[in-house]
Amino acid sequence: NEQTRKEKTEAVETLHAEIDELEASIAKLTEDITELTKAVAELDAAMAEATKLRQEEKEKNLATIKDAEEAQTAVAQALTVLKEFYAKAGEATALLQQQPEM
């Protein structure tokens, strides 16, 4: 009987030790979860900020591309005007040079 009581006491002590270990493990895991949740929240905030910055940069780049295209069109039009002007000026000069001498 005393042997049985001693075995059961040892079993209870072993179980209490396991309970203590598991409770410590639960506390550690709860702390880890809290830290990881905080880290995830920080990463989400950083990602949202990066996405916002990329969107702003995209809008700026689109505006720059539009301005460049407009400038390219304006340059092409200016070149056309200049070519026409110099072509007419060349014709006028040629006509002046072709007039018979008197």
Image (spheres, rainbow, N blue to C red):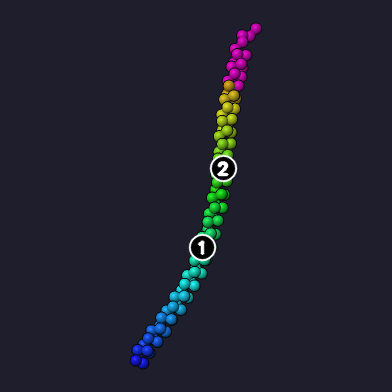
Instruction: Give the quadrant of the N terminus.
Output: bottom left
In terms of depth relative to the viewer, which is nearer, 69 or 90? 69
Residue 8 placement (x, y as % from top left): 37, 86
Q: Residues within 10 Å of mark 2 (few under 14, many from 20)?
A: few
- Element on which disc 2 rests: helix
In terms of depth relative to the viewer, which is nearer, 80 or 20? 20
Residue at left offset 52%, top offset 66%: 35
In magenta, the rendered stretch is 85-102
- Which numbered marker is on residue 25? none
In terms of depth relative to the viewer, which is nearer, 84 or 34? 34
Ranked by sequence position, the earlier of labels 1 and 2 is: 1
- Element on which disc 1 rests: helix
Q: Is residue 93 visible?
A: yes
Query: What is the three-letter code of the residue carrying label 1?
Result: Thr
71 above or below 87? below
Q: CA distance from mark 1 to mark 2?
A: 33 Å
Query: What is the three-letter code of the residue carrying label 2?
Result: Glu
Residue at left offset 53%, top offset 59%: 41
Q: Report the residue marked by disc 1.
A: 37
Q: Report the residue marked by disc 2.
A: 59
